[in-house]
Image: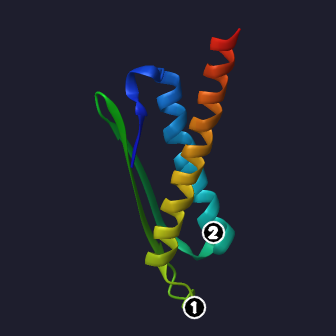
Amino acid sequence: MSLRLIDSLSYEELEKICEIAERAARKYITSKVPEEYISDLSISVDLEGSDTLNVDIEVELTLSPLCRNVDADDLAKESVRVAFEAIEKYLEEVRSKQLQTLKE
């Protein structure tokens, strides 16, 4: 996913993007499957770019054999979608604040 210019984001904002994405993906997964049924969960958020911010989110999920009626791959893919939505919402808030500052 490509987003706005990276040079207009502070280091703190970039860190927050990673935290928001990780939190959103984890929250989504744990809202669908009890934590005791999660054998392994790894969430990776990578940011890179010079002109445009590229965000890569990977979710690796292994569920307990007791959790047969949930597809771990589908759940992981959906959590990535939710994480991108959370990032976009955060960036809209940042843009709104920047526009407010420019108007003042």
Tell me which residue sits at (40%, 28%) in the image: 5
- The answer to whether the residues at label 2 and label 1 have Cβ atoms under 8 Å apart is no
**Residue 78 horizontal/vertical position (percent):** 52, 68
Above/below status of 102 relative to 22: above
Q: What residue is drawn where x is 55% and y is 85%? A: 70
Residue 98 lies in quadrant: top right
Mark 2 vs 1, N-terminal side? 2
Judge by depth and name the residue closer to the eye, 81 or 4. 4
Q: Quadrant of residue 47?
A: top left
Residue at numbered disc 1: 69
Distance Cα–Cα, label 2 vs label 1:
15 Å
Give the number of the disc on residue 26. none
Please identify, in this view, whether the residue under mark 2 or under mark 1 is nearer the observer: 1
Q: Is residue 75 left or right of residue 1?
A: right
Q: Residue furthest left?
A: 50
Q: Is residue 103 left or right of residue 82?
A: right
Please state which amino acid type lies under the numbered disc 2: Glu
Name the one closer to the observer, 9 or 73: 9
Residue, disc 2: 35
- SS at badge 1: loop
How many badges with numbers are in the image?
A: 2
